[in-house]
Image: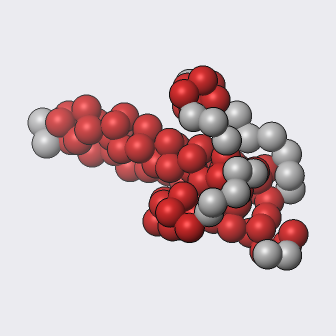
Amino acid sequence: MKPEEKRLVQALCYVLWPVALIVLVVTKKKDDLLFHAWNGLGFAIGALLLWIPIMIVYWISVIGQLASILFWVVVIVFAIRYALDAYANRPVNIPFITDFLKKNIKF
């Protein structure tokens, strides 16, 4: 894979979780691509876990509906930020997720 293609796939791992899942299944060599795939998938799972309590409040009040919209805007902004960092070969450090993955998964 060419370096430009690799950087693009690394960036897509943060924006589209299925890309991260495909990279995890296909990649055999341990390198930066595998790190970004795990990190992107961890970001997606973390966002989903944080979204569940917001959805409970969503059905109770209008404030929950506004919180849900705001939450997804923030998630999209951070996903784009992490993707741009990955594409530019800058380190991507997602709070809690990156540290957890570095301790528990060998890249």
Please, is residue 52 above or below residue 19 in the view?
A: above
At 56% from the left and 67% from the top, the residue drawn is 26
Residue 102 at x, y percent in the picture: 64, 29
| Side (left or right) of 43 relative to 106 | left
Check the image and tell me how it is coloured. Answer: secondary structure
At 65% from the left and 52% from the top, the residue drawn is 34
Residue 9 at x, y percent in the picture: 69, 67
Q: In which quadrant will I find the C terminus?
A: top right
At 25% from the left and 32% from the top, the residue drawn is 53
At 85% from the left and 76% from the top, the residue drawn is 2
Q: In which quadrant will I find the N terminus?
A: bottom right
Please, is residue 15 above or below residue 55 in the view?
A: below
Please, is residue 88 above or below residue 9 in the view?
A: above
- Residue 46 appears in which quarter of the rendering? top left
Q: Would residue 16 be seen by someone viewing this image from the given angle?
A: no
Furthest toward the left, the residue is 60
Front-most of residues 22 and 84 = 22
Furthest toward the front, the residue is 28
| Side (left or right) of 5 relative to 69 | right
- Residue 60 appears in which quarter of the rendering? top left
| Side (left or right) of 5 relative to 103 | right
Residue 98 at x, y percent in the picture: 62, 32
Question: How many numbered callouts?
Answer: 0
- Residue 83 appears in which quarter of the rendering? bottom right
| Side (left or right) of 48 relative to 98 | left
Front-most of residues 77 and 92 = 92
Q: Would residue 60 be seen by someone viewing this image from the given angle?
A: yes
Residue 103 at x, y percent in the picture: 60, 23
Front-most of residues 98 and 67 = 98
Please, is residue 74 above or below residue 102 in the view?
A: below
